[in-house]
Image (cartoon, helix red, strand yellow):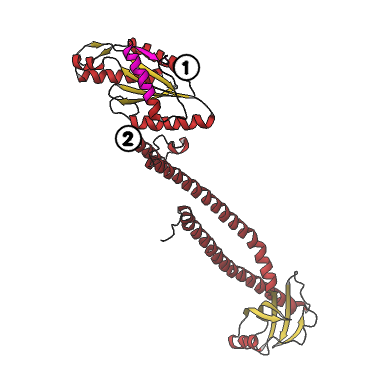
């Protein structure tokens, strides 16, 4: 199986490599052009110095004095008769350069003359118009030219290197940010695929004003739509039974890990069949919606509420014993007693509920606890309804 190439590596490769290549190519082209320019400037300086030196020598018979780094020589034909360097007299110009002067009959400049083991750039200026030629030569070593170039190029290359480094760091930082956000989206989608529909996406990603933010918001909308289909009861907008069981499992695991109590309750609408038989199933649906709203609002922040089936509801309390859970349910029940449902035909309907509450016991299965809660619920039904049954002598838990 072919190894998967990381997006981060690919993005860095397609951004940094061209940037580095561009930097290298640009620097190379600039170096070549700058070297050509420098040689032209040095040639011009050597030419001026040679002309001025020759004129000075012809006029005064004295040898000119040049600034440091430059050397001069006077040749009779190809033999040096005077020079600024000790021991230059009697040395030869070299057949190739002298032959070129004879062939062209004009000044020449060459940048590859070897003098005392060093390479020089030399300008040869003919001081007379007939043979034998007297030639004034002005020279500067290539090391001196290179030092001059380096003094100019080094700061420029340092600036270029700094720009490339800053650009590279910025690119890596940007790519890491993009890939990091994509990984968050991937993990969010994976959670959704694993039916973890309470997964959240970061506010920073959700609020981004770009394509990544669009993807994040679309992923959240997809999760919400799936959650409505998978987790939510379409009539009451409460959790459905499957989701209620999953929520209970999560509550049990957290409470057991922390050493905390939990409790569960089953509630049933009293005489609901009478509502359907008297006012119709549409009225019954309106009653179910209103009861769900009362429970959800009364127990918000205290418990999770799910529709268990038909007119039954399931409530799970985290870090809460049954006595405290019963007080919460009494408050919810009082709200239900005082609520009046108006159906589509203008009928006013009032209902009550009965609840059975039980402490969570880690040694018992959920089915065993549901059975105990159901028994308490039906005990309440048989003994007047419209109440919360927390404990009774006939039931031990």
- Disc 2 and disc 1: Cα gap in Å? 31 Å
Q: How crowded is the residue under tag 1: few (<14 C-alpha within 10 Å), some, or many (20+)?
A: some
- 334 over 42 or under it: above or below: above
Is 363 placed above or below 394 here? Answer: below
User: Label 2 belongs to which residue?
Assistant: 230
Check contact, mark 2 vs mark 1: CB within 8 A.
no
Pick the residue in front: 142 or 174: 174
Q: In the rendered structure, does residue 170 fall within the stretch colored magenta?
A: no
Which mark is in front, 2 or 1?
Answer: 1
Position of residue 238 relative to residue 136, above or below, is above
> Which labelled disc corresponds to residue 8?
none
Say which residue label 1 marks. 324
Please give the name of the residue rendered at 29% of the width and 21% of the height, measured from the top-left corner. Answer: 311
Dot 2 crowding, Cα within 10 Å, few <14, some 14–19, many 20+: some
Q: Which residue in the rendered view is the most extreme toward the right?
A: 86
Determine if the magenta segment contains residue 383: yes
Horizontal and vertical percent position of residue 52: 70, 73
In the image, what residue occupies the spot 32% across and 26% down?
308
The quarter of the picture where the N terminus appears is bottom left
Q: Secondary structure at mark 2?
A: helix
On screen, residue 225 versus residue 71, left or right, reads left
Q: Position of residue 56 (x, y in %)?
A: 74, 75
Task: Identify the magenta region.
Answer: 371-393
Q: Is residue 66 left or right of residue 4?
A: right
Label 1, secondary structure: give it.
Answer: helix
């Amino acid at each position: 199986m072919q190894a998967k190439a990381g997006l981060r590596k690919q993005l860095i490769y397609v951004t940094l490599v061209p940037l580095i290549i561009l930097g290298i190519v640009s620097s190379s082209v600039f170096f070549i052009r700058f070297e050509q320019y420098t040689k032209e400037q040095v040639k011009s300086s050597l030419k001026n110095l040679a002309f001025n030196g020759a004129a000075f020598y012809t006029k005064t018979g004295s040898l000119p004095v040049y600034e440091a780094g430059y050397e001069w020589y006077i040749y009779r034909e190809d033999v040096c008769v005077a020079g600024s360097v000790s021991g230059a007299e009697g040395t030869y110009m070299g057949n190739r350069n002298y032959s070129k002067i004879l062939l062209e009959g004009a000044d020449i400049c060459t940048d590859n003359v070897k003098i005392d083991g060093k390479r020089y750039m030399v300008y040869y200026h003919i001081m007379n118009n007939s043979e034998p030629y007297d030639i004034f030569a002005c020279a500067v070593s290539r090391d001196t030219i290179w030092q001059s170039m380096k003094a100019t190029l080094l700061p420029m290359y340092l600036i270029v290197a700094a720009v490339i480094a800053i650009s590279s760091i910025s690119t890596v930082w940007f790519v890491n940010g993009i890939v990091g956000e994509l990984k968050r989206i991937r993990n969010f989608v994976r959670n959704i695929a694993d039916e973890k529909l309470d997964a959240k996406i970061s506010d920073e990603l959700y609020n981004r004003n770009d394509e990544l933010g669009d993807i994040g918001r679309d992923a959240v909308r997809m999760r919400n739509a799936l959650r409505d289909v998978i987790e939510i009861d379409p009539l009451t907008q409460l959790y459905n039974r499957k989701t209620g069981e999953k929520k209970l499992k999560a509550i049990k695991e957290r409470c057991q890990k922390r050493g905390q109590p939990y409790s569960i309750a089953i509630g049933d609408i009293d005489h609901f069949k009478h509502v359907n038989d008297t006012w119709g199933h549409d009225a019954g649906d309106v009653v179910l919606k209103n009861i769900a709203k009362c429970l959800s609002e009364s127990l918000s922040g205290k418990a999770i509420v799910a529709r268990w089936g038909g007119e039954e509801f399931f409530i799970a309390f985290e870090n809460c014993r049954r006595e405290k859970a019963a007080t919460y349910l009494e408050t919810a029940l009082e709200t239900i007693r005082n609520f009046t449902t108006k159906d589509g035909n203008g009928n006013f309907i009032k209902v009550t509920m009965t609840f059975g509450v039980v402490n969570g016991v880690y040694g018992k299965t959920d089915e065993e606890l549901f059975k105990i809660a159901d028994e308490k619920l039906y005990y309440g039904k048989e003994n007047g309804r419209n109440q919360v049954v927390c404990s009774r002598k006939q039931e031990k838990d």
